Image (cartoon, rainbow, N blue to C red):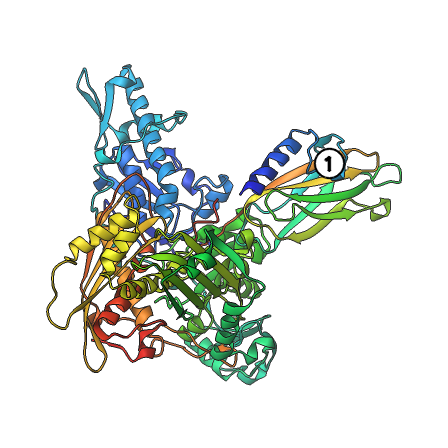
Amino acid sequence: MRRRSFLVVLLGLAFGARADPLLDPITKGAPVRQGRVKLDMPLLADNGNSVSMSVSVESPMTEADHVRAIHLISERNPEARMASFHLGPRAGAAEITSRVRLAGSQRVVALAEMSDGSFWMGSANVVVTLSACVDELGS
Amino acid sequence: MTTRREFLKVSAAGGLVFGFHLPAANAQNVAPEINAWVVVRPDDTVIIRYARSEMGQGSMTSAAQLVAEELDCDWSKVRVEYADTNAHVRRKRVWGDMAAVGSRTIRQSQDYLRKAGAGAREMLLIAAAQGWNAPVAECTASNGVITHGPSGRKTSFGKVAGEAAKLAPPKEVTLKDPKDWKIAGKPIKRVDIPDIVAGRIRYGIDAQLPGMVYAAIAQCPVFGGRLKSVDAAKIEGRRGVIKVLPMEDYVAVVADNWWRAKEALKELPIEWSFGAGESASSESILQFLRSGLDDASNVVVARRNGELEQGLAGAAKVLEAEYFTPYLAHATLEPMGCTAVLKDGRVDVWTSTQNAEASHATAAATAGVPLENVYVHRVQLGGGFGRRGGSQDFVRQGVQIAKAMGSTPVKLLWTREEDTQHDFYRPLSVVRIKAGLDASGNPVAWYSRVSAPSIISTLLKLPLKEGVDPQAVASFADQPYAIPNVLIEYAQRNPHVPVGFWRTVGHSQNPFMRESFVDELAKAAGKDPYEYRRGLLPAATKEHGVLEATAKAARWAEPLPAGVHRGIAVTEAYGSYVAAVAELAVSDKNVVDIKRLVLGIDSGHVVNPDNVVAQMQGSAVFMLSAMFWGEITIKDGRVEQSNFHDYRMMRLREMPKVEVVLAPSGGFWGGIGEPGQAAIAPAICNALFAATGKRVRSLPLKNHGFEIA
């Protein structure tokens, strides 16, 4: 529980576009701006085991101006940094499609690292409809 | 879709709105909707929406009582209507969690339901006050009528609903003190009972659509296996057969009626690739679990107080025992099934589900359509018990099959045998318990190691906190007795058999072990089992209170007739506190005659006392069935039981008298649907010990030669 609330706080900072220790290893303290990144995930998933998602980033994908990497960050998974996709101008389009495992309902962040060193982000809320006869899971 | 039959039934006042109909996308935006939960018609009919499922647990009525209480409406004018899942996703999940699981429908939604009722009342009052040009503080609502105090003018909810619906919802509302309740807290009759009795209620299995075809399925008999091949030509041309659908882990035969589909499937040659599970048996699984009792590795600590070893070393007497509980099936009276149709990018689903929202998500993901294009039509469930929540396998299959059939509606229905053999079973569990008693017989050390599968790891695929599955160690890790040195360990051992949430989950088995062992300690200490527990439970605990209330109602202190013996047990479960006293006689042929079963519960608040009594009685039927006969065994990787002849239920004439003691202490909201089962098995087994001197450390009782009278 403590770890979760810790991450929530960190991502709250991220949404406020200030540097934070969770994103620092990626951003090295550079500011993160909202926009240019579109993260598509279903509002509802009946199980967190395999949730489909896609990320697209507005970018001409030229040698001079392209997306260098797309990072997926989870608010609630034991491993907060779920994946990093490395791209180059030859990728043609800054788009990825994948499936991720989510440890419950949460906000997921896609962070795009541009060739000019700037960072942009988009996010999505996913509700995992856990039909569990348990108290202890919370939420 | 226009030709689709529509039988929307509008029942009498106080009844339930229900039927197979296709609502338009915005059907639930109809005016005058005061808020998402409350619609008031001009004729003063109040529609209260219900978001979760109804499977006999009565929450549909209790939830409406909570809304109606704060609304101050006329209960005789209330109708309950299911919230629509399509409107739900379009309206940003306005009705919240739709899951009827974990005994949490009421306790998890009571706050927002009561606020919805209070908020709607406030809006109706403001609308009336504005109409009279009077201050709202001078207006009061009662029984659906609004009165302006100073002038004595009156109006009804229905008359001002149109204006009220235009108002902004109040930011803050004050909820009533439960002691002032007039509708909640009362034994109001369940809204769905008249339709059930009259045969008007619709279950998932009742779905009927024009042009509908039927599917029967065979899943790989060995869990984890895959389909290798089918020889579809063998049943080609058979009367009524339309299509054979080979899927990854099952085969479906689609025909013009279900019997033909099922019979053709029997004749269909199917080859499976069984996989690693094929060699498993009950013996090999038990051996695997038992190894978890002794392994030094892959074991985690679930609770630690003091120093166990020191406690044991200083004890005057040390007792040790091993307990076992088997896999159990849910065996809902209505087998798994799903009716679905995919047309023009839209998916319609009728299925008995404990979580319509999860079914909705599964249907969308399986069909590959946006959530906004899915409609899960709400129906009553022919039993749930946890089978229809956590796993939406039947929805996935139903939509896959419908998708393969183009735009033809398909009704998938499992046979009883498929249902028994492809469940997500209550996990089996092996537990070693050890305790040390001081010279006066009080426990100074308690050790339990639970070796069992984890539902949370394997079904929900969620990470475990510190490696502990809270359900696997339930009632051990949170045991309430005053014992200075406690160590509870968990060895997660997952055989190939899928496990899931079975009514009462960990509390369906661990209290049997814990409370039986406490009886062993009482015996070793030479003390009365009730007084022993009472002495070990701190007076401030709720367990202490419910134990006393139940023992008093059972007249524990009074002598019993010759040949009749007693047992007692107490535990927490799902936020409530339960105790049981069993009185029984055992014949020389081991026939058990249960004379009396007294079940006590402290659920904090009680929303509908009659329904709590019914849930406690139903829990007794369910648990007595499980403890006398319930056992799923494995041979060659597959389940040996298939139907009610070898997976037995309690019969009417076998059912003992159940007396329910409601002992609500107020101030909290405990669950109702599951706690009732938790204390029954140990109370019965402790009484069996008193009667026979035989300590039962594994279930079911049939394996010990016991029968029920």
Q: Residues within 10 Å of mark 1 (few under 14, many from 20)?
A: few
Residue B66 position within the rendered picture, expressed as x and y whole percent measured from the top left: 30, 40
Quarter holding residue B562: bottom left
Is B154 displayed left or right of B228 in the figure? left
Q: Nearer the viewer, residue B518 or A14?
A: B518
Q: Is residue B392 visible?
A: no
Which element carries disc 1, helix, strand or loop?
A: helix
Seen in the picture, residue A101 relative to B656 is either above or below; the reply is above
| Residue at x 40% of width, y 73% of height | B416
B592 shown above or below B198: below
State the residue position of label 1.
A24
Residue visible at 73% across and 36% down? Answer: A24
Q: Quadrant of residue B678?
A: bottom left
Q: Position of residue A117 (x, y in %)?
A: 82, 34
B496 or B65, nearer to the observer:
B496
Horizontal side of residue B151 vs B481, given as left or right? left
Q: Amino acid at mark 1?
A: Asp
In the rendered picture of this protein, how many numbered marks are placed on residues? 1
Chain label for disc 1: A
Nearest to the observer: residue B580 or residue B36: B580
Whether residue B586 sits left or right of residue B685 in the image: it is: left
Q: Considering the image in quadrants, where does the C terminus of chain B appear?
A: bottom left
Question: Looking at the picture, how far across and down is residue B503, in whole percent?
Answer: 37, 60
Horizontal side of B229 relative to B540 (left or right) equals right
- Which residue corresponds to the image point at 29% horizontal and 33% vertical from the top-left? B71
